[in-house]
Amino acid sequence: MANGNSRKREKLIKICKVFGGGGLILGLIVGIFGTKIVDHIGANKTKEAYTAQIQKAESETKSLKEQLAGSREEIEKKIAAADWNMILVNEEFPLSKDFKVDLDTLDGEYKADKRIVKDAKAMIAAAAKEDLNLVVQSAYRDESKQTSVFEQTMETLVENGSSYLDAYDEAKKSVNLPGNSEHATGLALDIVSDTYTDLDEKFAATDEGKWLAAHCAEYGFILRYPKGKEDITGITYEPWHFRYVGTDMAKELTDKGITLEEYYGLN
């Protein structure tokens, strides 16, 4: 500290010499008040520098917010203008209340958007040629059915010891709320096999699960909720849930290893 004060005094003495006679007075000031003056000047400069840094940070933050707002607006426009096969539906982007879909029978009681039925049936037939029996366990769901599925999932969790609030939060990780589910679009299929019908991660290890993961893109489908992307999709890994996006987009998304959210820049 002493060395620092000495340097400050020396600096002021040099200033005194520049001012000639006035240097004597300044010299006395240096001897009596020098350190305090220098400290005061330094404090002011520090305060000014700090204030400038704060102002710069605020300006940069404002600029970033404006950029993000602009980016968000562009993303929303892109999603709103998407073709029917690239519609994004999740908790953040619920399905429009006036959404309509023309359905056709896919397999037994299950229906789907009529534009995907041909490709879905071709995929099931291709697997059958390799002695793999794909079974559609769920397809289009209206709001009533989706509500029922969500409530059943919650009830199971409560029966297993979860509180209602915890059960609600946990259920959302695997079943979308009505209005947030892709099943309402008629573009999503839950597919299992005739020998493994449970909707869990173990399906991925079955021959049917492996075949679907490897070949679904050839028929316009993607594995919608892949492992490792839970923080992006908001949904747990579901190796049975396949979403139709068309063959071109399915190949692009699969080759890049990205989800619909990432395609739209929401990662």
Image (cartoon, helix red, strand yellow):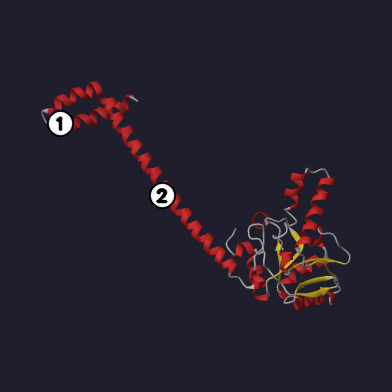
> What residue is drawn where x is 82% and y is 77%?
125
Front residue of 242 and 102: 102
Q: Is residue 32 left or right of residue 57?
A: left
Q: How many marks?
A: 2
- On the image, the x and y values in percent for residue 65 come to 48, 53
User: Which quarter of the rendering shows the N terminus?
Assistant: top left
The numbered mark, 2 or 1, whose residue comes first in the sequence reads 1
- Is the residue 211 above or below the residue 266 in the image? below
Which three-letter amino acid code belongs to the residue tagged 1? Lys
- On the image, the x and y values in percent for residue 142 come to 76, 65
- Is the residue 54 above or below the residue 222 in the image? above
Front residue of 255 and 102: 102
Q: Residue furthest left?
A: 21
User: Residue tagged by mark 1?
Assistant: 17
Q: Circle 1: is it few (<14), some (14-19), or many (20+) Cα within 10 Å?
A: some
Which three-letter amino acid code belongs to the residue tagged 2? Ser
Q: Is residue 119 left or right of residue 91?
A: right
Determine the image quadrant of residue 7.
top left
Is label 1 in a helix, a strand or a loop? Answer: helix
Label 1 near label 2: C-beta < 8 Å? no
Question: Is label 2 or label 1 in front?
Answer: 2
Q: Is residue 265 left or right of residue 17?
A: right
> What residue is drawn where x is 74% and y is 44%?
165
Front residue of 181 and 201: 181
Determine the image quadrant of residue 236.
bottom right
User: Which quarter of the rendering shows the C terminus?
Assistant: bottom right
User: Residue tagged by mark 2?
Assistant: 59
> What residue is drawn where x is 31% and y is 26%?
3
- On the image, the x and y values in percent for residue 113 come to 74, 73
- On the image, the x and y values in percent for residue 74 come to 52, 64
- Is the residue 142 above or below the residue 52 in the image? below
- Is the residue 165 above or below the residue 7 in the image? below
